Amino acid sequence: MTIQWFPGHMAKARRQVQEKLKLIDVVVELADARIPNSSRNPMIDEIVSSKPRLMLLNKADLADDKKTSEWIHHFQSKGIKTLAIDAQSGKNMKQIVSGCQELVHEKWERMRAKGVNPRAVRVLIIGIPNVGKSTLINKLAKKNIAKTGDRPGVTTAQQWIKVGKELELLDTPGILWPKFEDELVGLRLATTGAIKDTIINLQEVAVYALRFLSEHYPNMLKERYDLSEIPEEIVELFDEIGKRRGCLMGGGLIDYDKTSELVLREIRAGRLGDLTFESPSDWIEE
């Protein structure tokens, strides 16, 4: 699945970020804990250059805890301080402020030595669409400042937001890359809802998701759809789920589009359980 998608506002967002970096103390990079590497923009390392960085694995409540621990170890082994959070419920949110302060501690000490009182830490929040940036900002600011939505691309401009006296946040539109050259990356992003459903083939994405679940989370799949066994043929698996969930057309035929929508909707909502669609070892192999 090759997707070409680079709207003008995303190119503009990249320029805006690069212009603002001189004002920034810490970059907070937000990724989806279910696909920690696929939900990172390959351009981010280049864009943020040598700024101190805090990696947040959001939606950790929907991810496999064991895999999340592996990813935290992976990023921290690369020198990137990493936290697992859930912006929706507020899990581990207090650690974000202290984490940012820790990253500027030496800089602030140098300022104090010169007789200058440190100001609020200026933080850039960056990530691809639909990883939860607006929800995170609203939770940190304790009010609805940033627009939120369950579809990618809700944030379309950048704004400064104060978080108490400790932080000043710069929100930016989500930035995606021009082309998904790795088919698996596109499929993972589509499965978790980071790509608009209107520009993808939902059946193709559902086939990927069901095959992945059959291999890695078979018990969750069987329990959710009341299956005694998982059929080897993917069409048969679609048929079983479609029958059990009433995704039918005239004559009792299975509506594969409706079945695909159902499966993806339930995966994204966590109805099957806590799922992670990639491991650090996958990227070494790939």
Image (cartoon, rainbow, N blue to C red):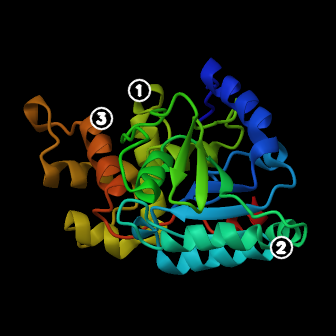
Rate crowding at label 3 as few (under 14), some (14 to 19) or many (20 or more) other CA atoms within 10 Å: some
Disc 2 versus disc 3: distance between alpha carbons?
A: 59 Å
Q: Position of residue 62 (x, y in %)?
A: 40, 65
Q: Position of residue 270 (x, y in %)?
A: 33, 62
Q: Tell me, for residue 109, which label it has, or none.
A: 2
**Type of amino acid under label 1:** Thr
Residue 165 as seen in the image, left or right of residue 237: right
Disc 1 versus disc 2: distance between alpha carbons?
A: 51 Å
Q: Which mark's residue is nearer the viewer, 1 or 3?
A: 1
* Quadrant holding the N terminus: top right
Q: Residue furthest front?
A: 115
Q: Residue furthest left?
A: 251
Q: Tell me, for residue 198, which label it has, or none.
A: 1
**Type of amino acid under label 3:** Asp
Q: Position of residue 107 (x, y in %)?
A: 84, 66
Q: Is residue 209 placed above or below 111 in the rendered structure?
A: above
Rate crowding at label 1 as few (under 14), some (14 to 19) or many (20 or more) other CA atoms within 10 Å: few
